[in-house]
Image (cartoon, rainbow, N blue to C red):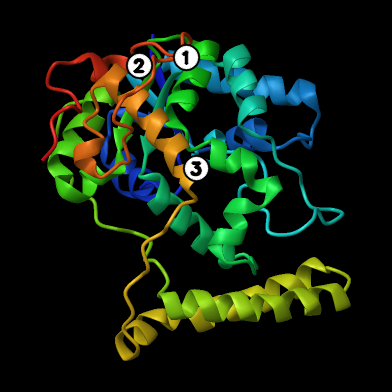
Amino acid sequence: MGRLVIHVGLPKCASTTIQRAVLPALEEVLHLRAPAYYEALTLAHFPAGEAARKSVLSEMRERAQAAPGLAVFSCEHLSMPANWLETRAHVPGRERKLGRDEITALMAEHLPEAHILLVIRRQADWLASWHQERVKRTETRPLARLIAAPEMAAVIESLEYGRLVGHYQEHLGPERVSLLPLELLRRAPEAFMARLFSVLGVQERPIVPQRKNARLSPLSVAARRQLNKGLRALSRLSGHRAGVDHRMHRFVKRVFAYDFLISRLVPMRPRPVTLPAALRESYARDNARLDALLGLGLEGLGYVIAREPETAPKNIEKAGRIANRPDSLGETP
């Protein structure tokens, strides 16, 4: 009987590297990549109906069970609220996505044996990268306003990783969650890969993935936000016609593909993200609880940590076999 690992994210945490560089290099691993699986877990309204959704998820489970070893499904959107990349009000005709809670309920019902893989990232760094991704999708607000927006509260809360672990443990079981900090990939790529292979249960091999997605320069982010205001106005004038929107955004994307030239001509260092004090403290307490429980060595990797961690919530238990190993993530490079 095969073993199923679902890489649920987080997005902006080396997902492209895992999907394009790591998994294709593991010949013994069944990489579940059918678009129907993605749609069955993410679309609020499955095109062929709910019976068809159940059939697709049953097929996914059967393929994983029939695999001689490991089967992996990777989709970084599974761990996020539905609106994490929505940059404007819903447009008629656009497919609505499911959020994390709804997706987890589907996995618990149809894929109950799944083991969850989470790659986490320092919250301030994640928020900066998330903001850039939204700016690429017509976001006009600066990061500070985005963080404070009421409709983004669920996204901000999703970065409380201790709560996130507890969420998956509650629905799928305490031993079915493994975590890896992205910062380890940057500081010690071989150690990160060794721990990833341990989670997957495959033999180690010399794969040192390279960075796949370059970030925009601070100047480009500022320019793109202003340009997005014009794009939104043109979209309204066109009646939000999909073809017009697509052509406009494709043109802008091509223009900003030359961001590397801007970075060389006008070198600017990214400004450190300053979180609101209350939010920073909330993350620090949650990081401390998680670190005290799992021994991840988060402080050594640059995470904010409260000095006197509170007692871990009752629904969070030892997560994943990699966290239980004595040579686990407590060691920092």
Dot 1 corresponds to which residue?
169
Q: Residue at x 55, y 23 (%)?
A: 60
Q: Which residue is mark 2?
A: 319
Q: Which numbered disc flags the more N-terminal residue, 2 or 3?
A: 3
Image side of residue 231 versus residue 62, left or right: right
Viewer-side residue, 9 vs 146: 146
Q: Secondary structure at mark 3?
A: helix
Residue nearest the viewer, comparing 328 with 193? 328
On the question of residue 151 being in view, the answer is yes
The local secondary structure at tag 1 comes to: helix
Q: Is residue 326 above or below residue 264?
A: above
Discs 1, 3 touching: Cβ within 8 Å: no
Horizontally, is 226 left or right of 162 in the view? right
Between label 1 and label 3, give the one nearer the viewer: 3
Q: In which quadrant is the N terminus drawn?
A: top left
Query: Mark 1: which amino acid?
Result: Gln
Left or right of residue 78: residue 268 = left
Q: Look at the image and tell me whether residue 7 can be seen.
A: no
Location of residue 210 with respect to 183 vertically, above or below: below
Q: Closer to us: mark 2 or mark 3?
A: 3
Q: Say whether marks 1 and 2 touch (CB < 8 Å).
A: yes
> In the rendered image of this protein, does residue 330 appear above or below residue 302?
above
Look at 28% across and 20% down and name the residue there.
Answer: 292
* Residue located at (62% from left, 13% from top): 109
